[in-house]
Image (cartoon, rainbow, N blue to C red):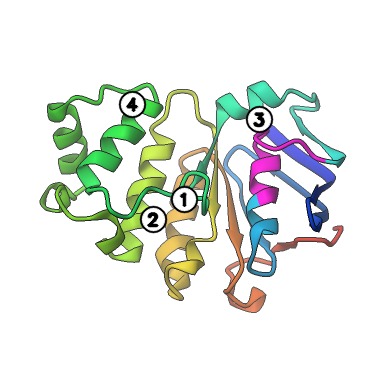
Amino acid sequence: MQVHADRVSIEGPHGTLLPPTSLTVADGELAFVHGVPGAGVTAFGLALTGRMRPGTGVVTIDGKTDPARLRRLTAVVDAPGVSEPDGALSLRVVAGEELALGGRPAGKEDVARWLSEHDAAGLANVRFENLEPAVRTRLLTALAANRRGVRMLVLDTPDRHTSEVSDWADLARKHAEAGLAVVVLTATTPPGALPATPARIGEQP
């Protein structure tokens, strides 16, 4: 599977939300995207996965424009104001909701089993906002990757939680090595500190 965004832009109510931006990513590949902090970075992730319609440009999957298929095969991880969990909920509740969303068994025993398998059984009743950043990103990414049919993950600004690049870059690489297409959106990490040269919001390759 290959997803290609060709000069995608989005206009917001108060001006340009996302300037023309391009990116190509395929199965087993890891791509980084860098932009200034704000809604534009998230908007690109939503457009890339068929969840927001571009004003100009096009996003294709395997050469075809098919937003419905894009949505089925992709997951956006921890997008502020979109897929970011309510911090007041316990990890147990968040995990249950994510498992159900992904079409997986989500009963009490199912959630307990999943948390145990991911070395998080002792954190089941911890408020989500109190999880360590690395644990938060690891578990949310694993839950997204566990969804039925998902072949691409978009991690939305994991650097907003921690400046430790390795916490999320190594995680993203592991999921790419497992065969998924993985895109990491960044905003506060200097581009030079990323493991690979990123695509830039508003710039063409």
Which amino acid type is shown beneath numbered disc 3?
Met
Q: Secondary structure at mark 3?
A: loop
Q: Are marks 3 and 2 in contact (CB under 8 Å)?
A: no
The earlier-in-sequence mark between 1 and 2 is 1
Label 1, label 2: how many angstroms apart (C-alpha)?
A: 8 Å
| Image x and y of residue 44, in percent | 70, 49
Label 2: how many residues lie within 10 Å, few (<14), some (14-19) or many (20+)? many
Residue at 74 percent across and 27 percent down: it is 62
Question: Is 147 or 169 nearer to us in this picture?
Answer: 147
Residue at 25 percent across and 63 percent down: it is 130
Which amino acid type is shown beneath numbered disc 2?
Thr
Residue ID for mark 3:
1
Which amino acid type is shown beneath numbered disc 4?
Ala
Residue ID for mark 4:
100
Q: Nearer the viewer, mark 4 or mark 3?
A: 4
Q: Which mark is residue 78?
A: 1
Label 3, label 2: how many angstroms apart (C-alpha)?
A: 24 Å
Residue ID for mark 2:
137
- Which residues fall within the magenta stretch? 43-54
The quadrant in which the N terminus is found is: top right
Question: Is 176 or 97 nearer to us in this picture?
Answer: 97
Q: Secondary structure at mark 4?
A: helix
Label 3: how many residues lie within 10 Å, few (<14), some (14-19) or many (20+)? some
